[in-house]
Image (spheres, helix red, strand yellow):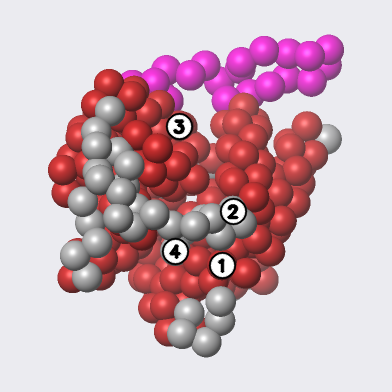
Amino acid sequence: MEIFEILGYFGALVIGVVLGLIGGGGSILTVPVLVYLLAINPVTATAYSLFVVGASSLVGAFKNMQKRLVDFRTAIVFSIPAFIAVYSTRKWMVPAIPESLFSVGDFEITKNIGIMLFFAIIMVLASVSMIRDNGKKKMEDVEITYNYPLIIIEGIVVGVLTGIVGAGGGFLIIPALVLLAKLPMKKAVATSLLIIAIKSLIGFIGDIENMQINWLFLAIFTGLSMVGMFIGIYLNKFIDGKKLKKGFGWFVLIMGIYIIWAEIS
């Protein structure tokens, strides 16, 4: 087993630990680990990432259900347009993207390069969200209301983005739930995990017919990520996840900039 392969499987464990420690954001590392350490094609990597993200989020969602933190009505309203969008994106939009997008001088932007550049932009946006999260006051007693049109539009947008880059999109979903459904922050975080699980796993179904899935590899990688999540949840008792989140945000920002540099150089 080569050193990069070992680092790749270790990366799966780290993804889970980050998810367990800070409750989100770790999935943004899945595609870079699969592409740069395990040499998996970017389109396949985004598909595998959907499964890893969906399975890991489902574990977290079940834990939150036991604590009665999940708002099922909001999850259903948001999930239906999101999973239709992500399934459609994976089944029809991604396969329809041409192998050669455009050229700038002698430099050709291929489908794989385009996906990784778009992913890197999403990483930068996610990092800014994590860095700027300054522990705002959580309003726990606000009456929950529903702006259905905007929730549906947000669900479609998040679904398309998830379908293209294979990340959970929690940095987009949580603010939407707080602003559009007036959910308290704890319920927004908990409900977002269920939404991410539903749309990611249904989106992955759109890939099954379009590509060969290495189920053994995917099971091992996902299993390591889940083990890491439980380690992270345990460590969370001793480490302040909020402080870690800002530091992780800077790491994601550097990774995003590196990916842009690596793809265009």
Labelled pair 4, 1 in contact (Cβ < 8 Å): no
From the viewer's perspective, is 121 left or right of 178? Answer: right
Q: Position of residue 6 (x, y in %)?
A: 59, 72
Q: Which residue is mark 4?
A: 23
In this view, the residue in front, 116 or 145, is 145
Quarter holding residue 153? top left
The residue where tag 3 is placed is: 161
Q: Secondary structure at mark 2?
A: loop
Which amino acid does the dot numbered 4 rest on?
Gly
Q: In the image, what residue type sits under mark 3?
A: Leu
Which mark is in front, 4 or 1? 1
Q: Which residue is mark 1?
A: 242
Q: Earlier in the sequence, mark 2 or mark 3?
A: 2
Which residues are the magenta region? 88-112
Question: Secondary structure under badge 3?
Answer: helix
- For image coordinates 70% across by 58% down, the residue present is 251
The answer to which of marks 2 and 4 sits earlier in the sequence is 4
Q: Secondary structure at mark 1?
A: helix
Assess whether residue 111 is covered by the magenta stretch: yes
Looking at the rendered structure, the kind of residue marked 2 is Asp
Q: Please identify the quarter of the rendering in which residue 88 is found.
A: top left
Residue nearer the viewer, 130 or 101: 130
